[in-house]
């Protein structure tokens, strides 16, 4: 579960996803996305303090999440060997990037121009939205 920003003494309930491994808060602070060891990505409504459902899932543990600034996109990285890009409003996967090996790190450029992904062998991959 995720601690509510509105009520620090309570927990946001509904939609437990096992062990949480990654969380990202949207730039407008309206929602958060969390991901866990069992693969699903869950959206949280921070204003109401409730789960807003599942966004999608990976075939392995998700270890990193990043919102792409200036867009409605969020990226996820997984030990399943992929990084995926999701359109939050449409609740749809829009890109699947096969990195080759477990993706262990992910970051979005502050400009939103690209995503950087790293894997266990030390290599780096870049992806440009659009």
Image (cartoon, grey):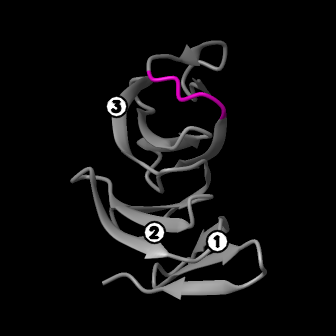
> Does label 1 or label 3 sit earlier along the sequence?
3
Front residue of this view, candidates 112 and 74: 74
At 43% from the left and 86% from the top, the residue drawn is: 128
> Is 95 displayed left or right of 103 in the figure?
left
- Give the quarter of the image for residue 49: top left
> Is 92 displayed left or right of 58 in the figure?
left
- Give the quarter of the image for residue 84: bottom left
At 54% from the left and 24% from the top, the residue drawn is: 6
Q: Residues within 10 Å of mark 1 (few under 14, many from 20)?
A: some
- The residue that mark 1 highlights is 101
Separation (CA) of disc 2 from disc 3: 20 Å
- The residue that mark 2 highlights is 68
At 62% from the left and 40% from the top, the residue drawn is: 37
Circle 1 SS class:
loop
Front residue of this view, candidates 87 and 17: 17
Magenta-span inclusion, residue 71: no
| Magenta stretch in the rendered image | 15-19
Circle 3 SS class:
strand
x then y, percent, for residue 92: 26, 55
Q: Quadrant of the C terminus?
A: bottom left
Residue 52 is labelled as 3
Circle nearer the viewer, 1 or 3? 1
Separation (CA) of disc 2 from disc 1: 23 Å
User: Is 7 drawn above or below residue 102 in the view shown?
Assistant: above
> Does label 2 or label 3 sit earlier along the sequence?
3
Q: Residues within 10 Å of mark 2 (few under 14, many from 20)?
A: many
Are the residues at dot 1 and dot 3 in contact (C-beta closer than 8 Å)?
no
Are the residues at dot 2 and dot 1 in contact (C-beta closer than 8 Å)?
no
């Amino acid at each position: 579960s995720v601690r509510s920003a509105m009520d620090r003494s309570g927990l946001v309930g509904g939609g437990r996803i096992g062990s949480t491994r990654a969380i990202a808060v949207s730039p407008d602070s309206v929602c958060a996305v969390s991901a866990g060891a069992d693969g699903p990505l869950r959206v949280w409504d921070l204003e109401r303090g409730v789960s807003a459902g599942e966004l999608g899932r990976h075939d392995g543990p998700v270890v990193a999440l990043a919102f792409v600034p200036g867009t409605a996109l969020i990226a996820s990285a997984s030990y399943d060997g992929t990084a995926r890009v999701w359109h939050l409003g449409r609740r749809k996967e829009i890109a699947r990037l096969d990195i080759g090996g477990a993706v262990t790190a992910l970051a979005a450029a502050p400009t939103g121009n690209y995503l950087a992904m790293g894997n266990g062998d030390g290599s780096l991959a870049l992806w440009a939205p659009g």
